[in-house]
């Protein structure tokens, strides 16, 4: 089938669902038949588990606020949660069961690009279900043949690669080696960073992929010492990333590291040794935290779940749930194609700006036929023709066993 613009693809109505192995959260069990079901496909086990629960809390927060303000289309929202196990086939199976059993109006997730892409091409797009990922950053998503049913509330790694190159050159790093997880996320970000770093006069001495779940990465690490790199760029996830870091340090192969969003977790410092990672630098998408909409989100999260963790994509998960609910309200139905077509109508200017938590205001304006656009906790949710958003990034480091943001910036073009 020939590839056509995402915006020109149309199709019929939505179905949805969950697995026997999935977790189900029903906020209004007595109103289950009336409820508007929203699926959350999250890594509650596997390599990305450290991010899954926190991101799920972001989704739950949005749903709870929406229900407290009257629900979607006058009915309660019901969140149906499925574990993608941080693996492609379990993600497909869980999403398929969300579609064939539960009847969700849309899916939030997955987090990993290697799970989001196969779910989009085999489940959500064929079944005409809108899917919004809060964390999948692979550049390949922008041109994916998904009939315009896949969106994301996080910027592409085409931007993260530029941001990382900017930061590493500011640190006067000139020669770097890269080890990256062998999936769409790892390859896409490695390519993006390499291009941007070399354009700034830097040299990538060697780039080597790694397969998750291995007991040893000493062979890959030994290869990466060739060419006398000043530091190792690790593009991966915590579970295997910790193994790589330990072996690099134990063998005396590397003692300076550069990280991307997938390694932004205090658990990394705890497991490797806080003092061993002091001074390392990293880059990850990050909202401007002094905005009114972010402050509302952060305070609401703290009231509901305790201190806001320093892991990424909690705010983008909240935004994915909120903007999907707005689109359902705007569409006036749970028809998947209608919801898809309404997403840009509630996310992009012109209209009245809607901030995080302003559900009643949004519903009132929609009922009057007025235009709105949502500015989320993570910033602008202005979807382009590919369902992508722009964004800002944090330069961060490990200090005292936790993650500390040093600055939030917009990458230079």
Image (tube, helix red, strand yellow):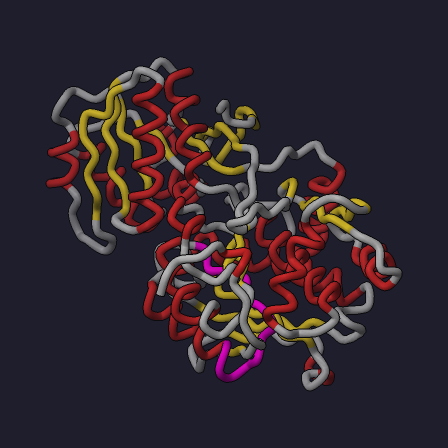
Q: Quadrant of residue 67?
A: bottom right
- Which part of the image, by quadrant, shows the N terminus? bottom left
Q: Which of 215 and 174 is in front in this view?
A: 174
Q: Which residue lies furthest to the top in this view?
A: 172
Classify 66 as above or below 409. Answer: below
Q: What stretch is highlighted in magenta?
A: 99-111
Judged left or right of residue 72, residue 40 is left
Judged left or right of residue 288, residue 151 is left
User: Is residue 109 located in the magenta-colored stretch of the structure?
Assistant: yes
Q: Which of 146 and 239 is in front in this view?
A: 146
Judged left or right of residue 409, residue 94 is left
Classify 255 as above or below 126. Answer: above
Q: Residue at x 54, y 59 (%)?
A: 8
Res. 83 in view: yes
Q: Where is residue 264 in the image (x, y as percent from the top left)?
A: 44, 40
Q: Where is residue 273 in the image (x, y as percent from the top left)?
A: 34, 36
User: Is residue 220 located in the magenta-colored stretch of the structure?
Assistant: no
Q: Which residue is drawn at 40% across and 63% down?
A: 45
Q: Which residue is drawn at 51% across and 38% down?
A: 285
Res. 242 in view: no
Q: Position of residue 347 (x, y in %)?
A: 68, 50
Q: Which residue is drawn at 16% across and 47% down?
A: 216
Q: Position of residue 359 (x, y in %)?
A: 79, 57
Q: Nearer the viewer, residue 113 or 195?
A: 195
**Total label count?**
0
Q: Quadrant of residue 57?
A: bottom right
């Amino acid at each position: 089938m020939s590839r056509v613009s995402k915006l020109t693809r149309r199709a019929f109505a939505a179905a949805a669902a969950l697995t026997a192995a999935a977790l189900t959260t029903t906020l209004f069990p007595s109103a289950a038949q009336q409820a508007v079901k929203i699926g959350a496909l999250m890594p509650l086990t596997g390599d990305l588990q450290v991010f899954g629960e926190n991101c799920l809390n972001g989704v739950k927060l949005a749903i709870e606020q929406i229900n407290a303000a009257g629900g979607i289309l006058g009915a309660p929202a019901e969140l149906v949660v499925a574990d993608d196990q941080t693996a492609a086939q379990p993600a497909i199976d869980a999403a398929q069961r969300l579609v064939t059993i539960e009847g969700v109006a849309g899916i939030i997730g997955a987090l990993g690009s290697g799970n989001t892409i196969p779910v989009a091409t085999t489940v959500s797009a064929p079944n005409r279900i809108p899917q919004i990922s809060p964390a999948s950053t692979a550049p390949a998503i922008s041109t994916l043949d998904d009939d315009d049913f896949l969106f994301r509330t996080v910027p592409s790694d085409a931007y993260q690669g530029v941001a990382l190159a900017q930061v590493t050159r500011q640190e006067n790093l000139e020669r770097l080696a890269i080890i990256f997880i062998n999936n769409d996320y790892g390859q896409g970000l490695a390519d993006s960073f390499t291009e941007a770093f070399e354009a700034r006069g830097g040299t990538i001495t060697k780039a080597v992929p790694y397969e998750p779940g291995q007991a040893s990465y000493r062979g890959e690490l030994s290869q990466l010492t060739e060419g006398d790199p000043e530091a190792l760029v690790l593009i991966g996830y915590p579970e295997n990333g910790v193994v790589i870091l330990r072996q690099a340090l134990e063998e005396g192969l590397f003692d300076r590291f550069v990280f991307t969003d997938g390694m932004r977790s205090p658990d990394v410092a705890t497991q490797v040794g806080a003092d061993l990672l002091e001074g390392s630098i990293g880059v990850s998408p990050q909202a401007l935290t002094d905005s009114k909409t972010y402050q509302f989100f952060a305070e609401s999260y703290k009231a509901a779940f305790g201190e806001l963790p320093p892991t990424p994509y909690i705010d983008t998960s909240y935004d994915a749930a909120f903007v999907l609910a707005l689109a359902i309200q705007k569409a006036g139905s749970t028809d998947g194609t209608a919801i898809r077509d309404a997403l840009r109508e509630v996310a992009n200017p012109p209209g009245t700006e809607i901030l995080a938590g302003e559900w009643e205001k949004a519903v009132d304006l929609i009922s009057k036929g007025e235009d709105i656009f949502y500015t989320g906790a993570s910033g602008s949710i202005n979807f382009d023709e590919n369902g992508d958003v722009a964004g800002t990034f944090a330069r961060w480091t490990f200090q005292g066993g936790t993650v500390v943001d040093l600055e939030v910036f917009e990458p230079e073009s």
